[in-house]
């Protein structure tokens, strides 16, 4: 079965980006929003990310025929980079703009939004109680055929499966920020997910020009963050213990592995407040003898000075110049 | 003080690469070798890596003027990439070939090799007893001025400082494999290293077109491996627990972080035997209930089939095609 009608439940940053990619790839796409106020917040996001997507295509023209272009082109927007031409990109821009405009609809009425949906992707705030309440509210509205997915970054589908009324048709489908460039779709069921449903969701992810990251079991924070957190921890540890400076640690990582950025550059993107919040959840956060305690002091000192990362113009690095 | 005479103590893979980069950057460089047999083993390495270095320059010509070239050019061989021309690279090839030939000498006599050395870099096997014995054997030969460094990857300078007879002039200076592309030089003293000596070694590393990675304290495995090991651990853990496959884990890492390779591709380069050896050193390696135990079984199963990584043509990936 190929999915034709796609519904996004929530129009935040990720909800909007997912909806645009769904529309871009030719799916009839509806974003359900809770209120008129939500429409006022979502419309500018649609405009902003539509521009970003078209600009990414525009920028890609510079690298057509460049042997290194394959590393930087926007992977979700251009399927066949090896055979692309500048004219081909112009066609993608025209078709993409049309698709994102014509295929994307906003709807306040849950029933209307969900009617006849092949897949509905919940992309709401990370609040367990609110999600449960919401799932219960749509149980009787969802079509028999509709597959329900959550884009939750931190919560597991098994927490919610029984509240959806369709556990066998429920799983996680998790997208990354800047979806047009970072085109992973982490696919993760719970124990009761029907394997056929899982396969259909994987196929849909491919339809959306995503690389499906197939998890065979539930794993908190999926694959990417399961890898990233230990790397960031290790960098933080070297810094907090006075072994080396952030610039040095990053340079060592970049040169040694060929990665474009090091752990402190990644933390500047994540944002220092988020980094501090995560550190404060560690068991030894309140132990003044621990490295974690010292680290929180060092990070909070920067936060107090307004050095929050890329968004504030300064974090571990100065972005204002 | 600028270092003019450089001595490599040992002509293995790293000793040879370091010596060639030292000669390439204009330093009078001597490799001390223990025996005629060592000469027979080192000469082919010199020839092999001389060709590799000149080939890397040749390959870089393709990327002159390419906006993405800055990410791939051989950083230790071309100082000013932004202003380089194809003709400029031809000059570097001519000068580099001349330097590597004229500035590099092999010597079996310790006294002759070390006479008047500004810096001597020990690049011998990772054997604590042998290193101590060797340091003792050169105590009375070394010139007063000579700074002694170890290229050891795993042992700490504090272990050897007292045996060198010149603890204040002794520290670690650690280079990476494929030194012409991976141009880090990890600089790490012990508590008794003279800060002025440390600064001179940092300056010498820069003179060799290296990026000095300055560690302020001793850290086993320096910066790079302190970051890399937790990442590899995390990838192994996801695989051993059946969460996801190596290809999936690597794809998630590459797309999510922009890195050129994922943890299993790195392990294929490191070699599965080394990976297995490192796992066997873990405290829970013999506990049949542990993830480590399961992981060792999974890795050893591949080793038994001759799947050792890139060098054997197959590891987690097939390189024979």
Image (cartoon, coloured by chain):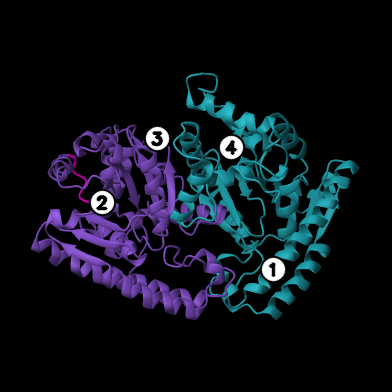
Chain colours: A purple, B cyan
Mark 4 or mark 1, whichever is nearer to me: 1
Q: What element carries label 2?
A: strand
* In the image, residue B189 above or below residue A267: above
As drawn, is B132 to the left or to the right of A93? right
| Circle number at residue A217 | 3
Q: Mark 1 points at which residue?
A: B59
Q: What element carries label 1?
A: helix
- Do circles 2 and 1 both sit on a common chain? no
| Circle number at residue B180 | none
Mark 4 belongs to chain: B
Taking the magenta stretch, the answer to whether it contains residue A122 is yes
**Which tag, 4 or 1, sits closer to the chain's start?**
1
Q: Name the residue under label 2.
A: A120
What residue is at 63 percent from the left and 29 percent from the top?
Answer: B300
Look at the image and give the residue range highlighted in magenta.
A118-128
The answer, for residue A94, to whether it is visible in the render is yes
Mark 4 → mark 2, Cα distance in angstroms: 57 Å
What residue is at 19 percent from the left and 47 percent from the top?
Answer: A142
């Amino acid at each position: 079965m190929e999915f034709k009608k796609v519904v996004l439940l929530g129009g935040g940053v990720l909800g909007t980006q997912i909806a645009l990619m769904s529309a871009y790839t030719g799916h009839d796409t509806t974003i359900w929003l809770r209120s008129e106020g939500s429409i006022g917040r979502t419309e500018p996001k649609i405009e902003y990310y539509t521009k970003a997507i078209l600009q990414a295509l525009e920028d890609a023209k510079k690298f057509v025929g460049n042997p290194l272009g394959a590393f930087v082109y926007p992977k979700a927007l251009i399927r066949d980079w090896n055979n692309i031409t500048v004219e081909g990109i112009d066609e993608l821009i025209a078709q993409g703009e049309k698709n994102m405009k014509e295929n994307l609809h906003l709807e306040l009425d849950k029933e209307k939004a969900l009617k006849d949906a092949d897949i509905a992707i919940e992309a709401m705030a990370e609040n367990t109680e609110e999600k449960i309440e919401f799932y219960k509210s749509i149980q009787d509205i969802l079509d028999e055929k509709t597959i329900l997915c959550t884009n939750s970054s931190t919560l597991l589908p098994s927490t919610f499966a029984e509240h959806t009324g369709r556990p066998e048709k429920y799983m996680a489908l998790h997208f990354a920020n800047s979806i047009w460039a970072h085109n992973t779709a982490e696919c993760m069921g719970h124990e009761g997910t029907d394997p056929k449903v899982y396969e259909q969701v994987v196929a849909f992810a491919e339809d959306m020009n995503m690389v499906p990251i197939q998890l065979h079991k539930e794993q908190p924070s999926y694959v990417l963050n399961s890898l990233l957190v230990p790397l960031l921890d290790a960098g933080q540890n070297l810094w907090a213990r006075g072994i080396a400076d952030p610039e040095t640690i990053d340079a060592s990582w970049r040169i040694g592995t060929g990665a474009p950025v090091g752990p402190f550059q990644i933390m500047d993107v994540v944002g220092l407040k988020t980094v501090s919040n995560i550190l404060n959840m560690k068991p030894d956060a309140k132990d003044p003898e621990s490295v974690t305690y010292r680290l929180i002091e060092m990070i909070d000192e920067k936060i107090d000075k307004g050095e929050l990362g890329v968004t504030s113009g300064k974090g571990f690095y100065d972005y204002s110049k």
